[in-house]
Image: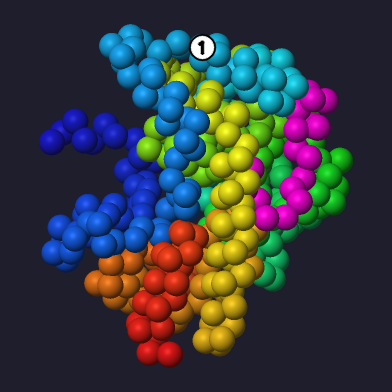
Amino acid sequence: MKILDKVSKEIQSLKPYEPGRPIEDVARELGLDPDTISKLASNESGLGPSPLAMAALKEALDDMHRYPDGGAFLLKERLSKTFDMPADSFIIGNGSNEILELVGHCFLNPNSSAVFSDYAFVVYRLVSVMFGAEMIIVPTKEGFISDLDAIYESIREDTSVVFLCSPSNPTGRSISPEAFDAFMDKVPEHVLVVMDEAYAEIALCPQADSLSYVREKRPIIVTRTFSKAYGLAGLRIGYGIAAPEIIHVLNQARQPFNVNLAAQVAATAALDDTDFVSHCISLYREAKAYIEGECTGMSLEFVPSDANFMLIKVGDGDGVFKEMQTLGLIVRPMSGYGLADYIRISYGTMDENRRFIAGLKKCLDK
């Protein structure tokens, strides 16, 4: 088809994002009962969705013939109270991924560069390539910790965006508050710092106070999501927090009605569900201790994580991934991140975590 010749070289070069396999796909392929499969591949909530969010969603079902509020007024007002910041400091997206893409629309182009760590969230690469920006990929320090000194040294005059993530996906490592403050003290004003905090609410160690720099109206945007802590991944809703001037620019590139009504209603209610988030954190602490202990007992290397997932070095990551599926366990192979020796495991319920360990022992014949 001749029309395909008009597709930009940037888009042609992209390899689509590969999500964790859905339960239904694995069930069909392997002839398994979907109810017997545990999906521990996509860092989803181990306790399901927020009950308050689900209750609000059920009440709103009769309004699904209406368009959503294009400005997400009620959700922004609720976020404003949560963070004690003006409502115009927030932009709502179809997942925090859309906020990252809006950053690309507004700040990246073929005459610019973007800086981020290797083994970072793959969407940073996708967004950079999509808009023709040069990628400056900085090696992590030992233990997969982001090297903010090296990131700073890699910033050039044409650098428009630095992508940071804490805790980082897929490594689970955090940026220390001290390292982040030192970086922000010297980052040049012509650079937009994107602080991706998808796991902030359920982080298992103290995180940097990134919002203090938003309040100072520095060139920074903090991105968060309702997918992880609140269990609303299926509704696709996230948000960005930045100075109103930056939010205004991003809104100029945002599509109308980009976030559906169901997602807005559920997210607004979820912000009140602090008990649910606390229960999730308790589960993840228990799961982390259990799986790390079992891995140590099997002499398996792992990356200590501050989020609801962890990397485990198993040798042949793709092979273990495939074999685990036959046992009704979906994990994440990491070859796409250049970590072919690893799998990534999301913490599930403790029953699922114990089942995972039993399956891993069987696959590795430990």
Would you call the spot at circle 1 few (<14 residues within 10 Å), some (14-19), or many (20 or more)?
Answer: some
162, above or below 178, in the image:
above
Q: Which residues are magenta?
A: 201-217
Q: Is residue 322 left or right of residue 189?
A: left
Viewer-closest of 8 and 216: 216
Check the picture and name the quadrant holding the C terminus: bottom left
Question: How many numbered discs sit on the rendered protein?
Answer: 1
Q: Residue 19 placed where, x, y %?
A: 36, 51
Q: Is residue 179 left or right of residue 234?
A: right
Q: What residue does disc 1 label?
A: 71
**Residue 211 in magenta?**
yes
Q: Residue 257 placed where, x, y %?
A: 40, 15
Q: Residue 149 placed where, x, y %?
A: 78, 55
Viewer-closest of 7 and 228: 228
Check the picture and name the quadrant holding the N terminus: top left
**Residue 337 in magenta?**
no
x 40%, y 25%: residue: 57
x 44%, y 81%: residue: 315
84, above or below 4, in the image:
above
x 54%, y 31%: residue: 270
Kind of residue at disc 1: Gly
Viewer-closest of 56 and 184: 56
* SS state under label 1: loop
